[in-house]
Image (cartoon, rainbow, N blue to C red):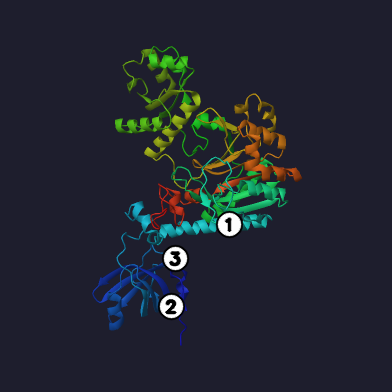
Amino acid sequence: MQQNLITKCNQISFEDLGKTISVRGFVTNVRKLGSLIFVNIRDLTGTLQVIFKDDDKELHSRAKMLNNQDVVMISGFLQSRSSANKDQMNGTMELVPKLLNIFSSAKTPPMTIEDNTTALEKLRLKYRYLDLRRPTMQKNLKIRHKTIMCIRNYLNDLNFLEIETPILNRSTPEGARDFMVPSRVYENKSFALPQSPQLFKQLLMISGMEQYFQIARCFRDEDMRKDRQPEFTQLDIELAFATPEEIMTLTENLLHKIFKEILNVEIKTDFLKMSYNEAIDNYGSDKPDLRYSLLIEEFTNEFKNTDINFIKKSFDNNEVIKGIFVEQDLSKKQLKLLENEAKKNRSKGLIWIQINSNKVIDSSIIKILSDEEKERLIKRFAGKTGFLLITIHESFKACVAMGAVRVKVAEMFELAPKNVFKFLWVVDFPLFEENSENQLTSAHHPFTAPKEQDIDLLSEEPLKVRSTGYDVIINGFEIGGGSIRITDKKIQHKIFELLRFSDEEIKENFGFFIEAFSYGVPPHGGIAWGIDRLIMIMTNSESIRDVIAFPKNSHGRDLMMESPN
């Protein structure tokens, strides 16, 4: 008697033709054509066509009752199809059933379960278990799984230790708001969920673990974006006795392995390195997307002798003119959208000037633009046709506003090619930033070491101090950031002092950490990757919600579980 082979839909081959096989999965399509009923069955690997004929009346009658998303097992004879489906992996074969086992009948789903579904995200998240049946979503989660396995295997081969750190933690000032968990045992006390394992991984270096990594769950109560969730997954790496160059090389080699092994994409290591100031000046962002140009330029000289009052007043306040030249036609509606984008990013407004090869055609300030200014602009863009978009502000704010406009223009005209990956390192970050109250805050975290050559500036000009931090950027997203850590207690105390921590606050928040440094500490540094962002980029997804099995929506709610409740 011939053995019945239980198999996956896309694991069958021509060698199985003529064999009796069984497949299990969801019914995804039923076509009733009189005496013939065609049924597609899909499992995690793919789809197989089943053809029911009316020569078996009972089986044919049961097949008539099948609905989409019923869970079944079908056993039968595998044969070649008379008309092949070239778009399907095993579209040259079909199953002639002898047995139909219906495990579970399904009611009509509230959304179409296919890649080109028109369901809104709200509905998809409410019925996430149905959304996850779509092949694209399953492919995304497979890529996520394979990527994490690739990371683990690579680091294990380099003798890294994977060590878990606590989820129930204490609250420490790290930049974002904490999620708190009230203690049942200790009245009026709470645990905090970790924003990152930062302190623990440094303590592991003090413990002599030397090479640590972790696929860590992290939690931050901050405003939502398409690349941000309140809970997320991070690859955490820390090394003793490491230099920034060694950590960058490790990162580049690991990314090379991931992209080659998972996507079969060959990427070049030795990524471009760009200073923070260069990134801000040219792209208006510390995470520039290099897949398109649209560089930010300064146009102050073109208006240096201007009679336009509001520009003259800006120059008196040491403001500058920054802008980009867009070589596409922009409608009035598009110009308004770009102006709103600039204003959302702290710009006072956006001026547009339409130029062709020999004249200024139109402008939002056409009535007050002098002939001399027009001539200068025409000369600057000789032979080009398009729109100059400019803003007037203090240099940093002007660059940031134009950086946001740059990204919006790229979205409007789809300037960023798909399946192209541009990598770079952004380095030489400022160690400190100023908040709205003109107080110093850590640009990264308070344990980031300053560059050795800038240490003397800590007392007098702290805003000029550069950090040993480094961010790895892919296609306009920061997917990893790290630094060399402070191991000198005097420097660490000075940093806390500049951040306005009193001795009492230092002891209360970091006393255990400072104490650990009294027992010998190796120099160390590390990096943390956003796994969700990396997978989003690798899968060309619009949001990290598409690469997380059960995400929160853009307002931080779980629509399926109806939480928080």
- 10 Å neighbourhood of mark 2: few (<14), some, or many (≥20)? many
Name the front one of labels 2 and 1: 1
Q: Which mark is residue 402?
A: none
Circles 2 and 3 in contact, beta carbons < 8 Å: no
Query: How far from the left and from the top, in percent, is residue 362?
Result: 32, 22
Question: Which mark is first along the chain, 3 or 1?
Answer: 3
Give the percent coordinates (x, y) of residue 32.
26, 71
Inter-mark Cα distance, 2 to 1: 33 Å
According to the picture, the residue beneath numbered tag 1 turns out to be 150
The quadrant in which residue 226 appears is: top left
Does 300 sit left or right of 240 as displayed?
left
The residue under label 3 is 44
Which of the two marks, 2 or 3, is nearer to us in this view? 3
Q: Within 10 angstroms of label 3, few (less than 14), some, or many (20 or more) residues?
A: some
Who comes first in sequence, dot 2 or dot 1?
A: 2
Give whichever of 272, 319 is nearer the camera: 319
User: Please, what secondary structure does the residue beneath circle 1 have?
Assistant: helix
Q: Residue furthest left?
A: 34
Q: Which residue is mark 2?
A: 21
The type of residue carrying mark 2 is Ile
Q: Which of pointers 2 and 3 lies earlier in the amino acid sequence?
A: 2
Give the residue displayed 52% in from the left and 45% down from the top. 178
